[in-house]
């Protein structure tokens, strides 16, 4: 079994764009069995709809995708709430943190609510 370790899906604020169906076609043509997917940072800066879209992709293709949610830890309690929603309601299996796009350093202390 060949697993792609991480693919970002969606329409990014940085111009990157990859849809789920396009990813599946690429996986099929390259012999990739499964992929870990996570959302990009969208132009709206709202990760919740992007997490939702990744959850829908996982539900539609459970044998192809292992989906991760994405939160911005600087959002404190809202990030915790979104992470819980990702895991408990959307059934996502992991967490992606992206310090460069969210604008924090990896060694920055977590918000006090964590």
Image (cartoon, rainbow, N blue to C red):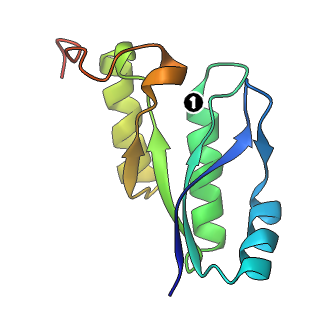
> Which residue is depicted at the point 73% across and 24% down?
13
The x, y position of residue 83, in whole percent, is: 37, 38
Query: 83 or 19, which lies in front?
Result: 19
Name the image quarter holding residue 72.
top left
Task: State whether residue 4 is above or below residue 96.
Answer: below
Q: Residue 25, located in which quarter of the rendered image?
A: bottom right
**In the image, farthest residue toward the front:** 30
Kindly give the residue lying farthest to the bottom in the view shown.
Answer: 1
- The percent position of residue 113, horizontal first and vertical second, equals 19, 16
The 10 Å Cα crowd at callout 1, few under 14, some 14 to 19, many 20 or more, is: many
The one nearer the camera, 40 or 56, is 40
Which residue is the site of mark 1? Answer: 47
Left/right of residue 3 with respect to residue 78 in the rendered view = right
Q: Position of residue 94 (x, y in %)?
A: 37, 52
Which residue is pictured at 43% across the width and 24% down the height?
A: 99
Residue situated in front as seen by the camera: 7 or 66: 7
Say above or below: 4 vs 101: below
Q: Residue drawn 82% across and 62% down?
A: 22
Quadrant assignment for the C terminus: top left
**Residue in the image at 79% along x and 53% along y:** 19
């Amino acid at each position: 079994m060949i697993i792609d370790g991480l693919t970002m899906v969606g329409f990014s604020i940085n111009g990157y764009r990859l849809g789920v169906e396009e990813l599946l076609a690429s996986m099929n043509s390259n012999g990739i069995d499964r992929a870990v997917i996570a959302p990009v940072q969208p132009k709206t800066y709202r990760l919740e709809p992007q997490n939702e879209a990744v959850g829908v992709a996982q539900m539609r293709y459970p044998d192809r995708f292992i989906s991760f949610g994405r939160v911005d830890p600087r959002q404190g309690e809202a990030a915790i709430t979104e992470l819980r929603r990702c895991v408990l309601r959307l059934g996502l299996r992991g967490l992606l943190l992206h310090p460069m796009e969210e604008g924090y350093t990896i060694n920055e202390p977590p918000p006090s609510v964590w």
